[in-house]
């Protein structure tokens, strides 16, 4: 029987609460499906680790997880550690060296959940955002000189490479092709950013020629926020840079009902390194420790992990269970306007898995 070794990195804040719920659900699911087992190795990396050791993860941390089948991640960020330290010290320290260049973020309105958009029907918002996850605005290029002096300068340089842009475009076109509508929107800002974004547009056009069956269009990122809000049904698959997609996907999550639902996969499509699955939300200090974090994003991330591992039956079973639970407003956490706890939602998903046939 196939055993998957999963590296669980809960991180900080509600990351710990939702990953605990996720591993519990996955244990039940593996037992229920019988065809595979899943073993979790837990890593206590994050801000508490940082306060003890001065680093978010050990120097050889990646060596401990590079042979796992996948990484199940919570969130990083603590009120008393600067955000760039936590993010670069752990999440980006895994994503970038493991070349998880395709960040995939599905968004849809799950049963029982209401979009803040007044007239949108459930079927009218069904998107997948593909975020370039290895370069662009988050390449880490830049520096600061004359720190603290009036003449201080800081640069934050975006890096776009032909290889990097081409591979994310191909990934996005492939994904668009695999979905019923075969439709891709390429997000850009090539009016104001006349170098990197112009190359981005040129490569989009070149790659598009390889996919005559995929209908595609181009949107400037600012106009894209309007289109997402006013005409959501005209969108399907979306590809954007690291920064643009980061912002657009929070908007997408909110339009689909809550950040607490939105999942993501950080994929190394070639499988040279493990891929990483996580909710898109952060550590949410405002609700940490209250037991009310919505675990749905983390469950949906597990669905993506199972898909990636090729466990289709289990992934579909888990998604059905999650949707059965979201359909019941009594099982909504406060971010969705309800009063349910993480525990109650988790128990309900477990019961739905056990009752599924
Ligand atoms: P956040 O995503 O942690 O929270 C934003 C708002 O959404 C908060 O009001 C929070 O309570 C709510 N929320 C988020 N997830 C929820 C859930 N599962 N259930 C119910 N409500 C939920 O973003 P924020 O507040 O900007 O950042 C907090 C920390 O998280 C910062 O340190 C930030 O750097 C970090 N962060 C980490 C990310 C990661 O690890 N991938 C992503 C985003 C932020
Ligand atoms: Mg974000």
Image (spheres, rainbow, N blue to C red):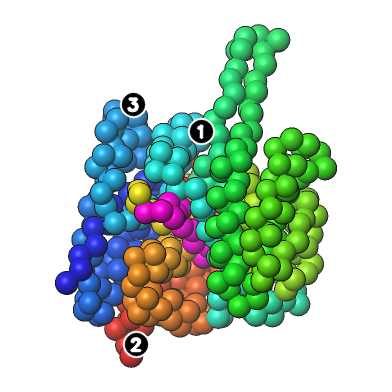
C-alpha distance separating marks 1 and 3? 14 Å
Residue 220 visible from this viewpoint: yes
Q: Which residues are magenta?
A: 258-271
Q: Which residue is disc 3 drawn over?
A: 54
Mark before the other along the chain sequence, 3 or 2: 3
Mark 1 CB within 8 Å of ligand 1: no
Disc 1 crowd rating (10 Å Cα; few below 14, some 14-19, many 20+) is few
C-alpha distance separating marks 3 and 2? 46 Å
Disc 3 crowd rating (10 Å Cα; few below 14, some 14-19, many 20+) is few
x, y percent for residue 303: 41, 69
Magenta span has 125?
no
x, y percent for residue 205: 72, 54
Q: Residue at x 43, y 76 (%)?
A: 319
Q: Which residue is disc 2 drawn over?
A: 356
Residue 257 visible from this viewpoint: no
| Callout 3: SS | loop
C-alpha distance separating marks 1 and 2? 43 Å
Q: Quadrant of the N terminus?
A: bottom left
| Callout 2: SS | loop
Q: Quadrant of residue 154?
A: top right
């Amino acid at each position: 029987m196939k055993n998957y070794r999963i590296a669980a990195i809960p991180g900080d804040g509600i990351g710990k609460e939702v990953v605990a719920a996720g591993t519990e659900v996955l244990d039940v699911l593996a037992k229920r499906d019988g065809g595979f087992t899943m073993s979790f190795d837990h890593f206590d990396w994050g801000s508490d680790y940082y306060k003890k050791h001065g680093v978010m993860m050990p120097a050889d941390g990646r060596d401990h997880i590079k042979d796992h089948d996948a990484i199940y991640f919570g969130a990083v960020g603590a009120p008393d550690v600067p955000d760039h330290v936590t993010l670069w010290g752990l999440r980006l320290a895994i994503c970038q060296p493991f070349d998880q260049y395709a960040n995939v973020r599905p968004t849809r309105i799950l049963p029982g959940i209401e979009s803040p958009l007044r007239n949108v029907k459930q079927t009218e918002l069904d998107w997948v955002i593909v975020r370039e996850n290895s370069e662009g605005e988050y390449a880490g290029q830049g520096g600061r000189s004359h720190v603290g002096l009036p003449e201080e300068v800081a640069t934050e340089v975006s890096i776009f490479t032909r290889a990097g842009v081409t591979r994310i475009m191909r990934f996005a076109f492939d994904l668009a092709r695999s979905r019923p509508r075969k439709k891709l929107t390429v997000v850009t800002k090539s009016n104001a950013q006349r170098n990197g974004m112009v190359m981005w547009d040129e490569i989009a056009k070149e790659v598009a020629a390889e996919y005559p069956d995929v209908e595609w269009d181009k949107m400037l990122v600012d106009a894209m926020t309007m289109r997402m809000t006013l005409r959501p049904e005209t969108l399907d698959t979306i590809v954007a840079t690291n920064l643009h997609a980061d912002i657009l996907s929070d908007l997408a999550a909110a339009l689909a009902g809550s950040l607490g639902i939105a999942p993501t996969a950080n994929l190394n499509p070639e499988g040279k390194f493990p891929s990483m699955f996580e909710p898109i939300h952060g550590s949410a200090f405002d609700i940490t420790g209250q037991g009310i974090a919505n675990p749905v994003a983390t469950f949906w991330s597990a669905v993506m992990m199972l898909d990636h591992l090729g466990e289709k039956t289990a992934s579909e079973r888990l998604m059905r269970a999650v949707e059965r639970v979201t359909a019941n407003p009594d099982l909504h956490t406060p971010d969705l306007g309800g009063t349910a706890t993480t525990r109650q939602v988790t128990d309900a998903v477990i019961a739905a898995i056990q009752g599924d046939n």
